[in-house]
Image: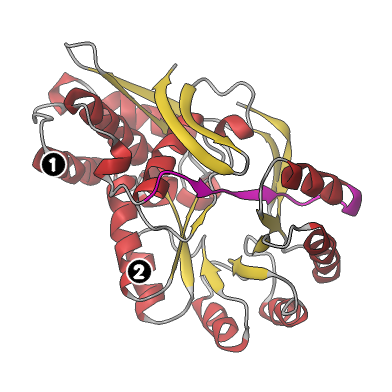
Amino acid sequence: MHFNKPFEIAYEKTDTADIVVLGLYDTEGNFGLGSAAPAPEITGETVDADYDILHKNINPDFFNIPLNNANDLKLYHEKIEKIFHQMPSAQMAVESAILELFAKRNNISLTEFFGGYRTTCDIVMTICLKNMADTASEAKERIKQGYKKIKLKCGVDVDEDSARIKLVSELLPHDGCLTLDANQGYTFDEAARFLKNMESYPIKLIEQPTRENDFDALKLLKKTSKIPIIADESARNFEDAEKLINGDFIDGINIKLMKCGGPFNFIKIFNLIKSHGKTALIGCMYESQISMTMGAHLALGLPIDYVDLDTGRLDFADDPARGGVDIYDGKIQKIEPLTI
């Protein structure tokens, strides 16, 4: 897929995203769609590797369990986890397709299946690394479109990042707010100085200010900063999340379906986060409308604190999917059936 505009963060700039689409069909004409959006630098996967493992394992013999109730889904999750546990994006594709097929076969809403917490919610809209003029232009455009929660990418230069944040904070509506994402870009000293300088701005949180494997830096920033510290790249799976939370290293976690392996692992991490009174985000990679729609079902089904589902059709004019989550006026408004 091709971005409408090139997308730049602390460690990369890209104008394309490769995905794998999986379709499952039953003999009654029902179908479920899933997609994998591998990120080699995060999950270690590639499109070719995901395609190969899906092609090898998803065949008629795989579907030896009925798909009639929640217990059947539990058995499929255990089976999928066993086969795909080292390939979380591929795992996400399979589990999503099975869940979608299950919902259609049983005429249920996945939003309701996940809890039915709400019917709409605000979207956090990301502005990637840009110069001051382009940052201002996009911020004005997004605010005009109804987005009140803006995420600014940062992590390259403390002074430049500070200037961009000051600029956008002055453009926000009175009920707007900022979140930040440094994508591991700062050293500890840079992050500490930056966060101290940012305390007077309407910033709700910062994601991954320092390197993913430096848990101690995250913990020290958590102790010294008034701005909540959120783990992203540091929290790839449930085991990472458990270590971060039990050790009180962070204030919250950005859970991504492509990192954790799908909706059931997402829910497991979400429940862990909330049981400790911490902040839960749902985020995304460079993804298709297909996986964005599964994320939207979770975002409406569960009381997730921040919903950063701003890719899919919002980013890619040539996304292969039709229907799915409908986002306008800065919110998830409805979810329609997915097709290709």
Residue type highlighted by circle 1: Ala
Residue type highlighted by circle 2: Lys
Q: Residue at x 38, y 66 (%)?
A: 240
- Residue 294 lies in quadrant: top left
Magenta stretch: includes residue 150 = no
Q: According to the image, label 1 marks what residue?
A: 70
60 up-or-down from 293: above or below? above
Q: According to the image, label 2 marks what residue?
A: 274
Residue extent of the magenta highlight: 118-133
- Picture coordinates of residue 174, whole percent (x, y): 72, 62
Q: Quadrant of the N terminus?
A: top right
SS at badge 2? helix
Label at residue 276? none
Question: Could you give the CA–CA distance between mark 2 and mark 1, rounded to whole angstroms?
Answer: 23 Å
Toward the viewer: 107 or 119? 119
Q: Quadrant of the C terminus?
A: top left
- Residue 277 lies in quadrant: bottom left
Q: Residue at x 48, y 76 (%)?
A: 250
- Picture coordinates of residue 65, whole percent (x, y): 9, 31
- Residue 304 lies in quadrant: bottom left
Toward the viewer: 257 or 58? 257
Colour setting = secondary structure
- Picture coordinates of residue 165, whole percent (x, y): 79, 64
